[in-house]
Image (cartoon, grey):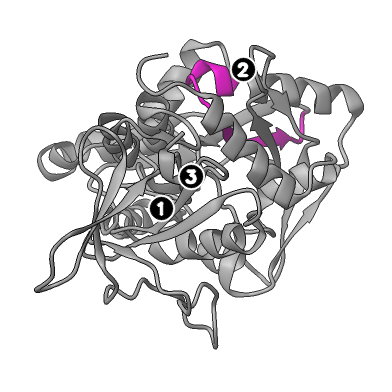
């Protein structure tokens, strides 16, 4: 622990980022900052602006949706740097001598999407020798890239649905082959960016014309695109949490995501803008299915080598099968997001969950594990 924080560990809550999930990250950070125990931790809020600058977040920063407008980082604060080795923050103001703010004991990166949840910020923190909440570089990178995620999960014996990966070069130079492969999945299909979250860039295609439009839409977020066969079933989700010490990970009570308001699937608007999503906890599924799902969620967590927390999403089909859709290594993290709600229903309130994650990070040695 740093000399500056002998009585309280210094926790830097980092949020924002230069991707389409910038606002979602801010919403989660607002919830964390609301409940983190200031008598137990010294807290430094750090925002990453859309242009990539790290700034000391203002105390009056807006962390919520107001009037339908999504929040963003105000980049007017002191610019920050985290030099390699030692984990000491340095503040830079134009025309002034850089000021060392002191060492950080742990970083809580409430961040989603590319250049954030995908192993990039984790790699930066590893190089700086700073402990952090959540999965490491490899697990974060694999979890972010849905194509590689499914390869790892399938290789671990977990059931995943049929899919086609469309890489940038193939879409430009070998489109006929790609379209033929997708047609073999059957209609409809779901088209999504391979490395995005929060349902950004996702659409449903019922024929070749809609498919090409959907691929181009997904490519606005990521040149690599995933096309998945539609699976008829209910969406059941389970949160997984690392245990202290050498105990195995814990799985929450499963919950079912219910979408209202005419949405054809669980899209961004249903998640964040309107009041069109609800969570039924516990999910109304047979007890043996719920237990199998919890076991599979932990297997997925361990297959990727996750740390901290994850949310694992399944389809429960009409013929009684469980199909693993994806794993999120840093799931949506507002107090009303799915993973925190699942843990609250399992007996761990949001503030306790935040504290557990920080304590797990403080226990973890930097470097190779």
Q: Quadrant of the C terminus?
A: top left
Q: Is residue 201 visible?
A: no
**Which numbered tag is attached to residue 207?**
1
**Vertical comparison of 63 with 308: above or below:** below
Quick one: 309 or 131, which is closer to the camera? Answer: 131
In front here: 356 or 98? 98
Relative placement, left or right, of 220 versus 164 is left
How far apart are the two marked residues, 1 and 3, measured between alpha carbons? 59 Å
- What residue is shown at x 33% (from left), y 76% (from top)? 74
- Quarter of the image holding residue 91? bottom left
Q: Nearer the viewer, residue 107 or 169?
A: 107
Relative to residue 151, is residue 316 drawn left or right?
Answer: right
Task: Name the residue that disc number 2 marks.
Answer: 299
Secondary structure under badge 2?
helix
Relative to 90, is 20 on the left or the right? Answer: right
Which residue is located at x 69 percent, y 48 percent?
340
């Amino acid at each position: 622990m740093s000399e500056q924080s002998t009585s309280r560990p210094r926790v830097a809550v980092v949020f924002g980022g230069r991707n389409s999930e910038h606002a979602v990250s801010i919403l989660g950070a607002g919830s964390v900052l609301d409940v983190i125990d200031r008598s137990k931790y010294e807290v430094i809020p750090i925002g990453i602006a859309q242009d990539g600058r790290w700034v000391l977040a203002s105390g009056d920063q807006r962390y919520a949706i107001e009037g339908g407008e999504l929040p963003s980082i105000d980049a007017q604060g002191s610019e920050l740097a985290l030099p390699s080795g030692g984990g000491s923050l340095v503040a830079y103001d134009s025309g002034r001598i850089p000021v060392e703010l002191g060492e950080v004991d742990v970083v809580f990166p409430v961040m989603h999407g590319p250049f954030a949840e995908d192993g990039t910020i984790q790699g930066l923190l590893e190089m700086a020798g700073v402990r952090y909440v959540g999965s490491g570089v490899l697990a974060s990178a694999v979890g972010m890239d849905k194509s590689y995620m499914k390869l790892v999960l399938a290789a671990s014996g977990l059931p995943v649905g049929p899919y086609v990966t469309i890489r940038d070069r193939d879409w430009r130079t070998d489109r006929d082959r790609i379209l033929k492969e997708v047609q073999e999945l059957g209609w409809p299909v779901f088209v999504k960016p391979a490395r995005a979250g929060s349902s950004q860039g996702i659409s449903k295609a019922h024929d070749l014309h809609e498919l090409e439009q959907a691929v181009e839409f997904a490519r606005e977020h990521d040149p690599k695109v995933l096309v998945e066969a539609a699976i008829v079933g209910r969406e059941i989700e389970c949160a997984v949490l690392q245990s202290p010490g050498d105990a195995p990970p814990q799985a929450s009570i499963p919950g079912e995501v219910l979408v209202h308001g005419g949405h054809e699937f669980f899209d961004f608007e249903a998640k964040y803008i309107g009041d069109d999503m609800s969570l039924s906890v516990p999910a109304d599924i047979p007890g043996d299915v719920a237990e199998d799902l919890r076991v599979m969620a932990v297997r997925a967590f361990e297959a990727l080598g996750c740390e901290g927390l994850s949310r694992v999403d399944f389809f429960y089909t009409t013929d009684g099968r469980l199909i693993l859709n994806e794993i999120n290594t840093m799931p949506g993290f507002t107090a009303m997001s799915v993973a925190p709600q699942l843990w609250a229903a399992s007996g761990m309130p949001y503030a306790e969950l935040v504290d557990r994650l920080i304590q797990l990070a403080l226990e973890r040695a930097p470097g190779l594990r």
